[in-house]
Each structure stands twice: as structure tokens, then as C-alpha cells.
């Protein structure tokens, strides 16, 4: 009898949860069933075992209606399609502020390295001319004579002897010299200036003299170049303004860009994970990298990244050691990237296992999406995974219920690994902080930070919440704002439709046509790790900017309706904040009713923790309807569900030039395919995540000649829009994990 591997058992159970469990148990090898090979497990026993499986194998998830996602733009019928059956079915390219699509086109560093080498060589030559040699000592006679008139014969003689020692070589053994005591600060300043102008190979600083009330000037060799005043002489302000990790960068060529910018290509890895790998190999922390936005884990993505004073050749040499990550397209720039410095993202999404009444149904749905767009909801990724939506934590924070917020963060939730679920339950049952810390994995950033703080300061729940990294803890408040926005958008569509502007709608004034609507969120393919959550820090922008921006927002009047100067695409809704303007029609009641129900005020704060108060967040605006930009679609047919249907950047590079790619043995590749969906279900990250189970066709043998249909979509979205919401409009189906799971039954 053929043995069924354990991983196949779980995989088959997931793809056929209603019918497969009994079947597999009944074909168990005889030695596991007892002495009689004819004895089979009873169906009732099998079902009992199924219900006793760990939570990670009986995952529940929140539904779209739980966070206000309830409407569609069109009434056209949808069709069946599976999103992210393979991570390569979801390809994302960042679009920079100049609307250029970021692609990985080269893994070489030669061009940029030659430029850096030229600049470095020039810098070395300049430094060499600054340092005197034996034949150059005479050229400093006039400077020494001038110094004699400024500082006196004794100091001039000391300086001359000091320069002669340098010229003779043995610079490592040369000790600094100290000039005569000088109590005149203005005179000391003149001496410092003299050295800077006449002896660039020397540096000076002020030290205490024989008496602490008297100062002396110390002169020493500038071993770090003309612009280096020595490590110990740097002012704190100068050190604090440097990037996080600048070790080994003191000798960087003066005329070269201080940041290396490169394109990061990654497969099935989140942004922070990929940067962590690069940082480890380069010997720097991941904080040293700058990027415009986090990208989805279950995808193939390309984005720009900067790092401070690192050579392109060093990063390029890592490519042969990296798995699922590649770097290339190097250049040196003067500024590092910051969050929010992008226009949006270009998506190439393949929906597999497409089943529709007819091709016309697919065509009509795709054409409608291109013409009318979709409701610009915040996707389910925005509200976390599992049974504790992040907006509930946000509501507790806004009410000032610190212990409640901490309990929600630490509460057990469905769909987590057994180890994590066990640790959460242990804390809930015992409140043992130290014991929970020992059990809880360290990569759970929010939970670990809270517990460590509570261990040091028992009972101080506010301090524990503030110990969470700022971008992550602000995610909770922003999530609640998103919850309000989604509900307001749904009510707007239900009451007033999707075809025309109505009295009281909010719009941007036509007098400021260049004004763009942006949310306070980061990229639409939000990273699925909470500690990587990306915001544009709207609450930190100066008040003047927001006051000016709000002056361009207005409620539509009767005169505006008569003039027909505004279209449905112009309608916006506010993300609540202290300076937000609300619609003057019935939609404002959505904000008031929901916050009142949750015990939250939009105008008053019940506590003094400003960052956890809507009245301290300035707020912003977001388009209700969003059209995909440069939208294209194409129907494909395929027979092998395990083969990619779209070329990645790495595939294109491989066609033009062979590249070194780390390989895994065939057995491991098969395991990776089988475990792909299980690893998602067992994922322990509790921030935004998109988990989609594979479609039935993926279980077919690769030699199967059955023909299947796929729909390839290509479009660009602004950085605050969710691609999953565009797919939802197309298919007319939920994007929740629970629904996607039913596609495989």
C-alpha cells in the first residue's frame, strides 16, 4: 500500500475540507489501523477528529461587511476566479513620483562603480596634494612666517617642527602639539581660521590648559581627509543628523552621491524581511535602508531602496548568494528615500481557474472596471488578520481604555500557529507577563514590546502601548478612521448611487485643479507585517499645510449642481481629524452614529494621550471612486497550473543573459508548492495579510492536458488604493479568506 506523506494529508484536507478528511483516514496503511487490515475508521470518529484540530487548521476570518465593505459600482454579474493561487500571479512594480515604472533590468554594478572609482581617485589625488612631502616643505615657509606674526616665535617653531615630522613620514607615530595658553577667544578663533585656510592637512580644536580657566589650541594631523575633524571632535548635532549606520563611510569621495539607490526585486517575501537579509549580509541594520513604501509578501515585487554610502559592487556581489531576492539598477544619489515618495504601483495580476457564463460576461465586467472603476474601499488587509480587527483596538485607544487595548493586542485569535495561540491563552488565563514572554516568538513586535514594558512597569498600560513602534501603534488609530470611511462610502453609494454628484457632497474646488486626494495610508499593497506598516504621517504635517488644503475642500451647492462643474469622480470623503470638513448631507450621520455607538467623540478627547486622539490627528480626504490607470486585460489558456503565466523581471533578465539563481532540490520544490497555502494559514503575523487558498486545478498533475482559463489584468493605482478592491468589483465576490476557501470545496 502506498504511504501518504503528512504534508499531502494536510494539503488535501485544506483543498477538500468537507470530503477529504474521511477519505484519507479510511485509506490509512494497515499498520496504523491495528492488526486487521480490513478495519477502517468510522466516519463519525473522523469528523470528531476534524473538529478537534488546532485553530490553525480551522481558521476563521473577518468578513467584508464587518468593516463597511458592502457595495459595488456596477450591477453586472461576476464570475469565478482565484486570486494569488501562486505568488507569481501577483506582480507589483513601484511607480515613482515621475510616473516611471520601477523595473529590475540589470544586476551589474560596473557602470556606477567606474563613476565612483573616478571620483574616489580624484578625491585621493586632491588629498595627496594637501599633504606635504619633503620637497614641498619649503612651500610652507611663507605660511609659517605669517603664523609667527599671529601666534609668536615659540608656536611658529613648534608648528614648523611638527610639519617636518609629517614630511619625514611615520604619520602614525606623530603626536599632536599644543600651542601656548590663550585666554582671548577671538584670537583663538583667528588661529583656527588660519589653519583651515593654510594647512588643510591639519585640524585644530580647543582643549583645557594648565588651568581650567585658560584654553589652548591643539594641532594634529587630519588622517580622515580635509573635511574630517576627527571622530571625537564631532558635535553631537552633526552625529545625530547622520543616517542610522554610517560606519566605514568616513572616506567616501566628497563629490559622489552619499546614497546608493537600487532596485529591490523580491519573491514571496515582505519588504522588511528582504531588507533584514541584505542588512545582515552588509553588516548594517535594516533601519539604514530608505524606501517609499512596503510591498506585499505574497507577490513578486520591484521597488526602489536607498542605503547610505555603500558601494554598488558590494551589493551586486550578494546576488549569487541571495534566494528570492535580487538587487540591481544601481546609481548614486544625494538624498535617501522616505515613506510616501511614490506615485503608486503598477499591477500585473493573473486570476486562474476562471469560470463564467460566457466570454461576454468577462468582457463586460472588465470593460466596466476600466470605464467606471471601483469603490475606493480600504481593503481587508487594512484591518488585520484573525478574529481581532485592528480597528477595534483603535477604538479602545481613542476611548482611553489602555488595558482593554493591551488585552485586545494580546488576546487569542483564530488562525495562528499553535505555539502563538498557546502563549496568548496562557497570558489570558494567568496574566503572567514574564512567562508569556518566554513562550511568545520575538517577531511579534507589538506583543513583545507591550509585554517587555509591562515587565518593567507593571500596570502601566499606556506606557506599554507607547513602547510599540510608532508606525505600528498608529496603525490602530488609522484603522478605525478607515473603518469609518468605508461605512460612509457604502452609505453614500446606497443612498445616492454612483452616477451623479448630490447636494452636500464634498469635492475639491475647481479653482485648485492640481490638488490630489491622498489618504493617510501607505501603498495599496500593504505589507502583511504590522511592524512594517506604512503611513505618510499626516498627523505630523504642519497645520498651515492642512489649513490651506482644507480651504480647497467644499460642500457642493445648488449653484454647483446647476452648473454641472463637478462629476461623480470628484466626490471625496474625509478621514476624521481635527481639521476635517464633513459632508453637509445625510452622510455625516454615519460618522456621528458609529463614533457615538463606540463611545468616541469626533470633537473632544477624553484623555491626554494626543497620539491616540482623533482631535490631535489632522485628518485628510480620499476619493470615493477610483479608476484604474492604463488598464489592460487579456484572456489566457493553460494546462499546467504549476507554471507561471507571466514573465517576471528576473525572467526577462535571464533571457538576455544567464544569471546565477539558487536552486532547491525537486523534492523541496514540491513541498513548497504543497505547503504554500498551509504556511499562510499558520502565519503568525497579526497585521494586514491577504491569504488565498489554491484552486482545485492546482492539484491536477502537471501532465494533465485539461485546458483552463486565466484572466491577466494590468493597471496602475495611486499609493492609497487597494488592488484587491478592484478585483472584488470585477468578480463580484468577497476577498475574505473564508470565501476564498470555499472556492476549493
Image (spheres, helix red, strand yellow):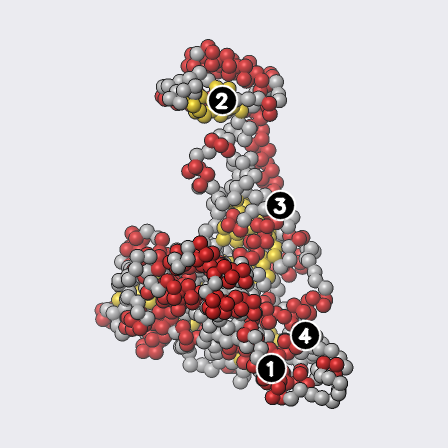
Q: How many other residues sit within 10 Å of disc 2, few (<14), some (14-19) or many (≥20)?
A: many
The answer to whether the residues at label 3 and label 4 have Cβ atoms under 8 Å apart is no
Q: Are marks 1 and 2 in contact (CB under 8 Å)?
A: no
Mark 2 or mark 3, which is nearer to you? 2
**Neighbourhood count class around disc 4 (C-alpha, 10 Å): few under 14, some 14–19, many 20 upward:** few
- What is the spatial separation of the Cα atoms under label 1 and label 3, in whole angstroms? 54 Å
Residue 423 relative to residue 571: left or right: right
Q: Report if the CB atoms under discs 2 and 3 are less than 8 Å apart.
A: no
Sequence-first disc among 1 and 3: 1
Q: CA distance from mark 2 to mark 3?
A: 37 Å
Instruction: State which quadrant residue 380 falls in.
Output: bottom left
Q: CA distance from mark 1 to mark 2?
A: 81 Å
Give the percent coordinates (x, y) of residue 472: 44, 59
First of labels 4, 1 by sequence position: 4
Residue beneath label 2, please?
Answer: 219
Report the residue that reaches farthest toward the right: 1
- Earlier sequence position, callout 3 versus callout 4: 4
- Numbered tag placed on residue 49 in the rendering: 1
Q: Residue at x 67, y 53 (%)?
A: 320
Q: Looking at the rendered structure, which numbered label has been put on residue 6?
A: 4
Question: Is 705 left or right of 237, judged from the image as shown?
Answer: right
Q: Quadrant of residue 322?
A: bottom right
Disc 1 residue crowd, few under 14, some 14–19, many 20+, Cα 10 Å: few
Marks 1 & 3, CB-CB < 8 Å contact: no
Q: Nearer the viewer, mark 3 or mark 4?
A: 4
Asked if one can make out residue 214 in the rendered structure from this viewpoint, the answer is yes
The alpha-carbon separation of the residues under discs 4 and 1 comes to: 16 Å
Q: Is residue 353 visible to the viewer in this orientation of the structure?
A: no
Amino acid at each position: 500500500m502506498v504511504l501518504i506523506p503528512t504534508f499531502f494529508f494536510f494539503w488535501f484536507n485544506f483543498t477538500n475540507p468537507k470530503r477529504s478528511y474521511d477519505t484519507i483516514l479510511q485509506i490509512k496503511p494497515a499498520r496504523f489501523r491495528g492488526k486487521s487490515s480490513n478495519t477502517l475508521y468510522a466516519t463519525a470518529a473522523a469528523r470528531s477528529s476534524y473538529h478537534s484540530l488546532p485553530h490553525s487548521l480551522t481558521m476563521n476570518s473577518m468578513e467584508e461587511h464587518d468593516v463597511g465593505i458592502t457595495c459595488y459600482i456596477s450591477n453586472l454579474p461576476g464570475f469565478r476566479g482565484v486570486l494569488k493561487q501562486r505568488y507569481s500571479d501577483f506582480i507589483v512594480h513601484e511607480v515613482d513620483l515621475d510616473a516611471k515604472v520601477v523595473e529590475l533590468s540589470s544586476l551589474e554594478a560596473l557602470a556606477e562603480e567606474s563613476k565612483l572609482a573616478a571620483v574616489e581617485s580624484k578625491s585621493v589625488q586632491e588629498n595627496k596634494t594637501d599633504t606635504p612631502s619633503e620637497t614641498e616643505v619649503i612651500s610652507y615657509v611663507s605660511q609659517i612666517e605669517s603664523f609667527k606674526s599671529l601666534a609668536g616665535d615659540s608656536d611658529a617653531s613648534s608648528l614648523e617642527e611638527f610639519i617636518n615630522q609629517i614630511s619625514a613620514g611615520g604619520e602614525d607615530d606623530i603626536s599632536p602639539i599644543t600651542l601656548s595658553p590663550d585666554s582671548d577667544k577671538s584670537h583663538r578663533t583667528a588661529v583656527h581660521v588660519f589653519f583651515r585656510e593654510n594647512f588643510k592637512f591639519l585640524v585644530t580644536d580647543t582643549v583645557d590648559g594648565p588651568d581650567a580657566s585658560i584654553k589652548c589650541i591643539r594641532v594634529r594631523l587630519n588622517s580622515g581627509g580635509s573635511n574630517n575633524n576627527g571622530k571625537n571632535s564631532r558635535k553631537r548635532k552633526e552625529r545625530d543628523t547622520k543616517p542610522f549606520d554610517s560606519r566605514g563611510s568616513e572616506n567616501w569621495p566628497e563629490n559622489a552621491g552619499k546614497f546608493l539607490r537600487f532596485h529591490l526585486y523580491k519573491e514571496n517575501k515582505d519588504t522588511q524581511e528582504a531588507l533584514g537579509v541584505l542588512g545582515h549580509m552588509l553588516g548594517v541594520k535594516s533601519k539604514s535602508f530608505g524606501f517609499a513604501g512596503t510591498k506585499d509578501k505574497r507577490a513578486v515585487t520591484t521597488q526602489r531602496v536607498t542605503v547610505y554610502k555603500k558601494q554598488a559592487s558590494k551589493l551586486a556581489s550578494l546576488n549569487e548568494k541571495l534566494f528570492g531576492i535580487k538587487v540591481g539598477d544601481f546609481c548614486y544619489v544625494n538624498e535617501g528615500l522616505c515613506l510616501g515618495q511614490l506615485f503608486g504601483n503598477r499591477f500585473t495580476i493573473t486570476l486562474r481557474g476562471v469560470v463564467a457564463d460566457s466570454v461576454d460576461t468577462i468582457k463586460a465586467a472588465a470593460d466596466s472596471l476600466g470605464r467606471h472603476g471601483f469603490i475606493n474601499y480600504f481593503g481587508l488587509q487594512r484591518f488585520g488578520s484573525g478574529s481581532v480587527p485592528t480597528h477595534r483596538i483603535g477604538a479602545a485607544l481613542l476611548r482611553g481604555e489602555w488595558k482593554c487595548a493591551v488585552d485586545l493586542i494580546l488576546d487569542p485569535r483564530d488562525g495562528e500557529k499553535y505555539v502563538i495561540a498557546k502563549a496568548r491563552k496562557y497570558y489570558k488565563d494567568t496574566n503572567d507577563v514574564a512567562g508569556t514572554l518566554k513562550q511568545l516568538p520575538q517577531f511579534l513586535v507589538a506583543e513583545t514590546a507591550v509585554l517587555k514594558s509591562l515587565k518593567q512597569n507593571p500596570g502601566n498600560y499606556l506606557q506599554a502601548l507607547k513602547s510599540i513602534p510608532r508606525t505600528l501603534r498608529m496603525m490602530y488609530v488609522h484603522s478605525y478612521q478607515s473603518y469609518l470611511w468605508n461605512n460612509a462610502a457604502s452609505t453614500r453609494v446606497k443612498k445616492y448611487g454612483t452616477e451623479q454628484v448630490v447636494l452636500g457632497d464634498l469635492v475639491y474646488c475647481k479653482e485648485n485643479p492640481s490638488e490630489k486626494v491622498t489618504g493617510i495610508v501607505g501603498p495599496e499593497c500593504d505589507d502583511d507585517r504590522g511592524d512594517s506598516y506604512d503611513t505618510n504621517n499626516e498627523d505630523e504635517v504642519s497645520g498651515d499645510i492642512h489649513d490651506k488644503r482644507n480651504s480647497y475642500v467644499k460642500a457642493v451647492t445648488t449653484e454647483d449642481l446647476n452648473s454641472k462643474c463637478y462629476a461623480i469622480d470628484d466626490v471625496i470623503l474625509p478621514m476624521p481629524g481635527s481639521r476635517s470638513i464633513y459632508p453637509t448631507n445625510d452622510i455625516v450621520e454615519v460618522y456621528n452614529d458609529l463614533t457615538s455607538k463606540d463611545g468616541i467623540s469626533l470633537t473632544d478627547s477624553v484623555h491626554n494621550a494626543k497620539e491616540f486622539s482623533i482631535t490631535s490627528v489632522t485628518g485628510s480626504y480620499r476619493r470615493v471612486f477610483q479608476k484604474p490607470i492604463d488598464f489592460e486585460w487579456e484572456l489566457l489558456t493553460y494546462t499546467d497550473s504549476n507554471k507561471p503565466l507571466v514573465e517576471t523581471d528576473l525572467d526577462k533578465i535571464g533571457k538576455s543573459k544567464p544569471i546565477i539563481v539558487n536552486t532547491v532540490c525537486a523534492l523541496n520544490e514540491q513541498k513548497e508548492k504543497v505547503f504554500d497555502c498551509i504556511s499562510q494559514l499558520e502565519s503568525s503575523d497579526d497585521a494586514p495579510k491577504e491569504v488565498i487558498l489554491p484552486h482545485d486545478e492546482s492539484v491536477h498533475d502537471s501532465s494533465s492536458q485539461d485546458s483552463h482559463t486565466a484572466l491577466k489584468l494590468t493597471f496602475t493605482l495611486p499609493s492609497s488604493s487597494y488592488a484587491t478592491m478592484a478585483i472584488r468589483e470585477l468578480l463580484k465576490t468577497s476577498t475574505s479568506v473564508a470565501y476564498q476557501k470555499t472556492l476549493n470545496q
